[in-house]
């Protein structure tokens, strides 16, 4: 069992493995109202562009035989739902399911969903334990800034694999390690010193989730190692692309036919 990790630089302690899910569910509920504002501040709005690239990557990589306009998409850890909305927009025949365990994050998504958008369903659920009827149901599984938050990211990858049809695409957007190495000290300064301030501005008061973000990002595997995890799950054509020196990384892989 992994014990809490003390980070000397921030003093923040990551939750124990056994508490992680309830800790995150509670804390994402608490920051839900300011989450989108924070993302805009944190990335200077670039996350919107990165999410568009994530959607395009999924659509271009598909080999499931379903027309892109008719595919089914499962957006895990959907939160305020930018990816889910992006997949559903202008494609009434595409069925999109947004799943998250935070009721308030999903409330933000529900408020953003246009009333005429009938092809986006929202469900509260646990990405670590998807219903058995999801097996082989989806052409695309997307996970935006969520895999790092799972209690067991490798088991989460297996759930995504199970939910996909053969030929279906997994796309994951996640904060990454930085490259080239000379950028690392600046990037770490930004992550560990500036993010808590931006969080305070977005939220109106300080919140430990803005210490959780840099600490959990630092603990998460780098791009090469995480790419291996995806391949070891059984995906093929696994790739990654760094955005803005690794501030975010787009990972992709296809379930073999
Ligand atoms: C950083 S937010 C990402 C939101 C959105 N996908 C985006 O790209 O901006 C992470 C989300 O993961 C959700 N989450 C974390 N662990 C989860 C789990 N086991 N099952 C479902 N949702 C989970 C949280 O509730 C939160 O809404």
Image: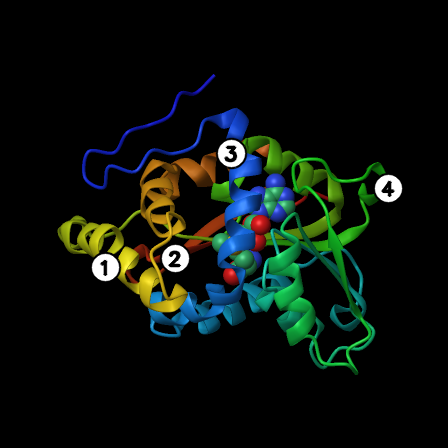
Residue at mark 2 to residue at mark 4: CA–CA distance? 32 Å
| Mark number displayed over residue 214 | none
Residue at mark 1 to residue at mark 3: CA–CA distance? 24 Å
Q: Position of residue 246 (x, y in %)?
A: 32, 55
Residue at mark 1 to residue at mark 2: CA–CA distance? 17 Å
Marks 2 and 4, the one that precedes in the sequence: 4
| Mark number displayed over residue 248 | 2
Q: Position of residue 81 (x, y in %)?
A: 61, 64
Q: CB under 8 Å between callouts 4 and 1?
A: no
Residue labelled 4 has its Cβ within 8 Å of some atom of ligand 1: no
The residue positioned 65% from the left and 36% from the top of the image is 128
Q: Position of residue 159 (x, y in %)?
A: 68, 37
Residue at mark 2 to residue at mark 3: CA–CA distance? 22 Å
Q: CB under 8 Å between callouts 1 and 2?
A: no
Q: Please, is residue 176 above or below residue 131 in the view? A: below
Marks 3 and 4, the one that precedes in the sequence: 3
Q: Label 3: few (<14), some or many (≥20) within 10 Å?
A: some
The residue positioned 24% from the left and 52% from the top of the image is 179
Residue at mark 4 to residue at mark 1: CA–CA distance? 43 Å
Asked whether the viewer can see residue 211, the reply is yes
Residue that mark 1 sits on: 194
Which residue reaches farthest right? 133
Q: How is the image coloured?
A: rainbow
Residue that mark 4 sits on: 133
Look at the numbered disc 1 and give the secondary structure of its residue. helix
Residue at mark 3 to residue at mark 4: CA–CA distance? 26 Å
Look at the numbered disc 3 and give the secondary structure of its residue. helix
Residue that mark 3 sits on: 20
Residue labelled 1 has its Cβ within 8 Å of some atom of ligand 1: no
Marks 2 and 3, the one that precedes in the sequence: 3
Look at the numbered disc 4 and give the secondary structure of its residue. helix
């Amino acid at each position: 069992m992994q014990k809490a990790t003390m980070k000397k630089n921030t003093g923040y302690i990551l939750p124990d493995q056994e508490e992680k899910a309830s800790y995150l569910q509670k804390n994402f509920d608490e920051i839900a109202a300011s989450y989108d504002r924070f993302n805009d501040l944190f990335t200077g709005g670039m996350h919107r562009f990165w999410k568009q690239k994530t959607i395009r990557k999924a659509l271009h990589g598909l080999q499931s035989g379903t027309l892109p306009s008719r595919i089914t998409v499962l957006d895990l850890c959907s939160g305020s739902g930018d990816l889910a909305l992006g997949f559903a927009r202008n494609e009434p025949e595409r069925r999109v399911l947004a799943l998250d365990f935070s009721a308030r994050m999903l409330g933000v998504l529900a408020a953003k969903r246009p009333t005429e958008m009938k092809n986006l369903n929202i469900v509260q659920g646990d990405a670590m334990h998807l219903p058995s009827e999801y097996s082989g149901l989806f052409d695309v599984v997307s996970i935006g800034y969520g895999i790092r938050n799972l209690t067991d990211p490798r088991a989460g990858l297996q759930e995504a694999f199970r939910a996909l049809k053969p030929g279906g695409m997994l796309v994951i957007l996640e904060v990454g390690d930085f490259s080239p190495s000379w950028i690392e000290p600046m990037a770490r300064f930004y992550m560990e010193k500036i993010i808590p301030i931006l969080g305070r501005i977005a939220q109106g008061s300080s919140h430990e989730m803005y210490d959780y973000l840099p600490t959990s990002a630092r603990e998460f595997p780098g791009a090469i190692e995480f790419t291996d995890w995806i391949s070891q799950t059984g995906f093929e054509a696994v790739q990654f692309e760094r955005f803005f020196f690794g501030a975010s990384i787009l990972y992709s892989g296809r379930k073999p036919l």
